[in-house]
Image (cartoon, rainbow, N blue to C red):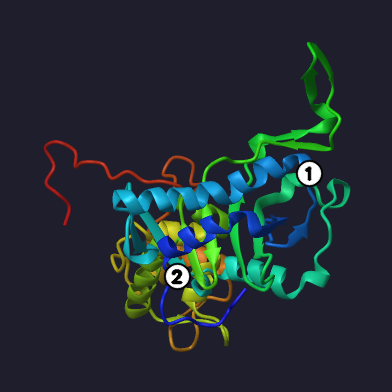
């Protein structure tokens, strides 16, 4: 696979027509990968040959070739919302987990072990990668990738098979219903996204949500004085904490002042410290959770029991009838 930067993105319509012409002269390998994006090699029996390319190649190029005749458009994932008749594209270099996975398969093949249910457990598998290479030039490759739904996995120990009118013990270690939909295609430095939701789930890449989170982080850094350990900042912490990135989407920043945050933390007996300059110290993700909860007013003390609570969701009530709005 050519990992060098290219000045122009892949012309997916030209590519699909070229691959369609030589589709019988392309080899295929399968890899599984787990939630940590560790790839495992696999083998398949000859009787699957009739299914492999239709599932992992023919349907992908067929959708593009059909789309060329019906006005399909290719749009940048980061700048677009999914619409019918649209194929979204992003750069492999932007999607860190996808880039890592491809690099491991391409450049660390000797370190990749064969998958074993006893050693690796199929319940930990996140997806399957089909690696295609040209018979005329094995260095030229591309990939299609599908997410594995654990609901489509059958464990041999607890499954039965129905054959010739009778139930019997399921003979395989694991059974899998392979996803039939097109999901992700990688060509050189380009990722083509056929299914946005599954792409985002596969590689934990939610650019639009992260973009909003980054904007909120900038607002917070402008409004509050914060202190981080050397080499760490709020943006880096937020990128590693999906829960906080999600919470930031709808937060109003600045309604609770710096002084109120410190006072609020003290009232709630929370372990949040300040330095000599009055900056709030954020040492790790736990401190960040506490700080974000404070500026979102997510802690209360019950007037009935005196117990402290963290609020998981809030709904603003209307003012009681007959009372003027509180300023």
* Residue 245 screen position, x and y as percent: 45, 62
**Which residue, given by chain and number where applicable, does mark 1 sit on?**
46
Within 10 Å of disc 1 (Cα), the crowding (few <14, some 14-19, many 20+) is few
Look at the picture and state if 113 lies above or below 309.
Answer: below
Q: Name the residue located 42 percent from the left edge and 52 percent from the top edge.
A: 65
Give the quarter of the image for residue 298: bottom left
Q: Is residue 52 left or right of residue 272?
A: right
Q: Quadrant of the N terminus?
A: bottom right
Looking at the image, tell me whether mark 1 or mark 2 is earlier in sequence order.
2
Q: How many marks?
A: 2
Residue 179 in view here: yes
Query: In terms of depth relative to the viewer, which is nearer, 239 or 175?
Result: 175
* Residue 30 screen position, x and y as percent: 71, 54
Q: SS of the residue at dot 1?
A: helix
Q: SS of the residue at dot 2?
A: loop
Q: Name the residue located 36 percent from the left edge and 73 percent from the top edge.
A: 220
Q: Is residue 50 left or right of residue 198?
A: right
**Which residue, given by chain and number where applicable, does mark 2 sit on?**
10
Check residue 101 in the rendering and tell me which mark sits there, or answer none. Answer: none
């Amino acid at each position: 696979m050519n990992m060098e930067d290219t000045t122009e993105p892949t012309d997916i319509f030209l590519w699909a027509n070229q691959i369609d012409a030589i589709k019988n002269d392309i080899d295929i390998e399968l890899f599984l990968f787990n939630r940590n994006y560790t790839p495992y090699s696999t083998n398949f029996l000859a009787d699957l040959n009739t299914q492999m390319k239709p599932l992992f190649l023919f349907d992908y190029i067929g959708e593009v070739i059909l789309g060329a005749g019906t006005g399909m458009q290719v749009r940048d994932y980061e700048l677009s919302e999914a619409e019918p008749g649209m194929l979204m594209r992003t750069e492999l270099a932007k999607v860190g987990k996808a880039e890592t996975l491809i690099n491991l398969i391409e450049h660390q093949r000797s370190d990749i072990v064969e998958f074993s249910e006893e050693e690796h457990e199929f319940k930990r598998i996140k997806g399957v990668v089909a690696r295609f290479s040209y018979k005329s030039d094995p260095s030229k490759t591309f990939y299609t990738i599908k997410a594995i739904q654990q609901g489509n996995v059958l464990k041999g120990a607890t499954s039965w098979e129905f054959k010739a009118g009778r139930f019997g013990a399921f003979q395989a270690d694991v059974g899998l219903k392979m996803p039939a939909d097109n999901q992700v295609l990688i060509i050189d430095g380009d990722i083509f996204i056929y299914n946005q939701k599954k792409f985002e789930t596969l590689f934990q890449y939610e650019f639009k949500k992260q973009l909003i989170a980054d904007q909120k982080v900038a607002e917070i850094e402008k409004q509050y004085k914060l202190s981080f350990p050397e080499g760490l900042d709020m943006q880096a912490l937020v990128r590693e904490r999906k829960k906080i990135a999600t919470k930031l989407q709808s937060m109003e920043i600045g309604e609770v002042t710096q002084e109120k945050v410190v006072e609020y933390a003290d009232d709630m007996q929370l372990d949040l410290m300040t330095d000599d300059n009055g900056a709030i110290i954020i040492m790790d993700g736990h401190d960040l959770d506490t700080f974000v909860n404070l500026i979102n007013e997510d802690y209360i003390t019950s007037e009935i029991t005196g117990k402290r609570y963290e609020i998981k969701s809030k709904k603003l009530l209307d003012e009681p009838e007959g009372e003027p709005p509180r300023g």
